[in-house]
Image (spheres, helix red, strand yellow):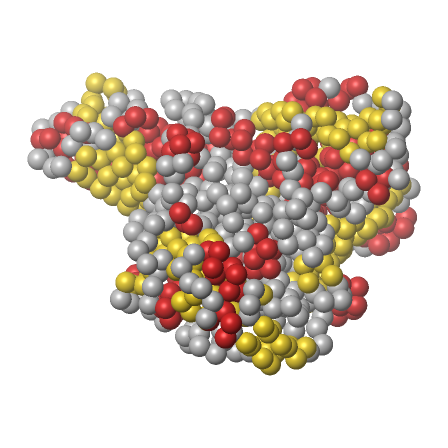
Amino acid sequence: NAIVGGVRSAISYVPTSWLPGATPDPLIDKRVSLGTQQSRVDGSDKVRGAARFAAEVKMDRLLYAACVHSTIARGRITELDVAAAETAAGVALVMTHRNAPKMAMPPPIGLTNLKAAGSNIVPVMQDPDVRWNGQVVAVVLAETQEQADHAASLIKVRYEAAPARTRFEEAKASAHTPESLLIERNRLKRGDSEAAFEAASHKVDATYRTPWHNHNPIEPNATTIAWEGDRLIVHDATQMLYGTAGSLAKVFGIKETQVFVSSPFVGGGFGGKAFWDHQILGAAAAKLAGRPVRIALSRASMHRLIGGRSQTEQRVALAADGGGKLKALLHHGFSVKPSSSVCDEAFTLTSRSLYASESYDIVQHTVDLDVLANTFMRAPGEAPGTFAVESAMDELAHALQIDPIELRRRNIADKDPLTGAPHSQSDLMLAYDLGAKRFGWERRAAKPRARRDGEWLIGMGCASGSFPYMRLPGTSVRITIDGNGQAMVSSAAHEMGMGTVTVQRQIAADRLGLPLESVTVRIGDTSLPFGAMAGGSSQTASLGAATTAASVKLAGDLLRLAGNDTPLAGLRPSEIEFADSGLRKIGDPSRHESFVSILGRAARSEVSATGESSAPLELLKFSMHSRSAVFCELRVSDVTGEIRIDRLVGAFDCGRILNPKTAASQFRGGMIMGIGMALTEETVFDERKGRIMSASIADYHVPVHLDVPDIEVLWTDIPDPRTPMGARGIGEIGITGVAAAIANAAFNATGKRVRDLPLTPDKFL
Ligand code: MOS
């Protein structure tokens, strides 16, 4: 598996329980609450406005922050006139590099250090140097947000500009091939793919381009911060609670235990709610002012400060024999990052895992530019990667005059194409079959431009989606069962809208043999056991494995508490299981004792055990990926070139679906993000100045309701025998393949192949 590299060095954990990967999780056959449709536990809180977000936390004497951003890409500040701002109404403080406290560099995020969350590893406000266009050069604190915003506009900055690398084409000449956080080895070769490509009878060779994307969740990044003596209290919008705490501790030279981070609700994350300059600046300003600070980023500040997805340029060359079997697969390309960013856009993940080709040559190059650091953004790598590879597959199908689904059937890898490892579970073609049926694929005209309705050309397309399975070691869960037989399950997990609490409650209920109503799940702050992150679509598996580990310990503890005067007397831990709100002998319901009875007899008010997600050894033995088949029907105006999407169908092969209701929302949400990627989302970048010109949601267009058609989602629901609960990740896969399915449908409608996202009207005229 592509991600194993990062994980391998993390394996120092001793497994304490049922090991994912060894035998199937006993829960994969259970259908008590898992697999049933459950509404969000926190749904009514969200709807009533009772859910508290980071920028809503009340604090006494709170100051509001506004940021001033640099207007050059590289150089130094020569003059900073803050006098007018300092004397403006309501202003308490202006912080610049001249008065900011001394702080260390933020520690970089890594799969082996989940107590660090930095994407952009630069000193923050420690010197007059400017490193990208948009860097914060001053923070204004005032009694109200409006006063802070106004005062920020009064600050005058002069710069001495230095030569900056802001032009992609120029910088390509010095592109390099670094190891990436997400891919183990950069260049992969088998056979002589160039020669195979030349010799093959059918081929396509094309270059695909995807633009920069910025993060635009509903809730902008925000944090409300107070120092209580040498303790730092942080109400943050984060998908890495402990990563944020650990990072702030490093930056301010204090212990992790001195930082408390709370984030019970996050209004969408997608990779952007990690650790950026604003948390550092907020904490520094609060220290300087001696008052609590709220730094709630404006949309403009988000576009300048919170990195997104790098642009890519990808060459995909595919060659096949007359029967459509791949003889050569070449995937080469470029993505961008400043040298300070630790995140590469691993767009070759797809070509490394999806298809079996006789020969291949896969490599990606990184172009260094002096720009805002890029970071993870929903399905990093796979989102732009599937656009290129799945567009190329469609081009090859057209060249071969083979049905695009049939072409995939002939080439889908039945084991890992690179390592030969078996799939843990994989049935993408079943997803294609289910999806094709639901969609009505047989109505598609193979010939482009064959269907028309007035000015509208109608087309159908499909594409594969893919995202690797991941489970993070160290994530911990504490289970407490009280004298009334009620369970409390706690972990510093994250709720970004996906239904974490709801699904974890289902998992714990089935694991512990309890009804749903008897389980409460607590998440969302660093007073709770370590949670790795909500990222890499890994949180459910990580928490599920930790819950298992905790439950195994708990069973042993309960058995000891039960003593000898019990139907369980004389049984070994391996002979018991959780059932009917208690423990029983496996296969013998007559030998059962309830939690209430065990605790009552032992005169205990509660019993508690903590377990952690072991190293993801399953990834060493198996090729593990969630997959999807995406179908699109759309119309393109022959007059204006505008695309209207009529229908999307997503058929997912992601192991067992734990909660059909929340899963469907995850899939749909991802597919909607895919619509944005396909049609409108593009960070407009001025290459002369390195400045983002689209720093608002008036200029950066995310899909609105009118852009979103009826979306149907379905799934194979085949348990993965190597994962906790039989489930694989579902958070990120939704976006993958969607842009290709839409571009392929647009080709089918118009006969015009557009290889540059977004698919704006001008490109179809
Ligand atoms: Mo995801 S890009 O790991 O939030």
- Relative depth, front residue between 256 and 145: 145
Residue drawn at x 52%, y 49% as measured from the top left:
220
Q: Is residue 589 above or below residue 722?
A: above
Q: Position of residue 469 (x, y in %)?
A: 54, 43
Where's the C terminus, which quadrant? top right
Rendering coords of residue 214 (x, y %): 62, 51
Q: Position of residue 83 (x, y in %)?
A: 50, 75
Q: Quadrant of residue 343?
A: bottom right
**Of residues 230 and 613, the one drawn nearer to the viewer in this rendering:** 230
Residue 7, position as x, y percentages in the image: 50, 54
Q: Quadrant of residue 664?
A: top right
> Residue, x 40% and y 36% (percent of image)?
49
Q: Is residue 628 visible?
A: yes
In this picture, residue 167 sits left or right of residue 341:
right
Residue at x 66%, y 80% (from the top left corner): 160
Q: Is residue 338 visible?
A: no
Instruction: Specify whether 147 is left or right of 707.
Output: left
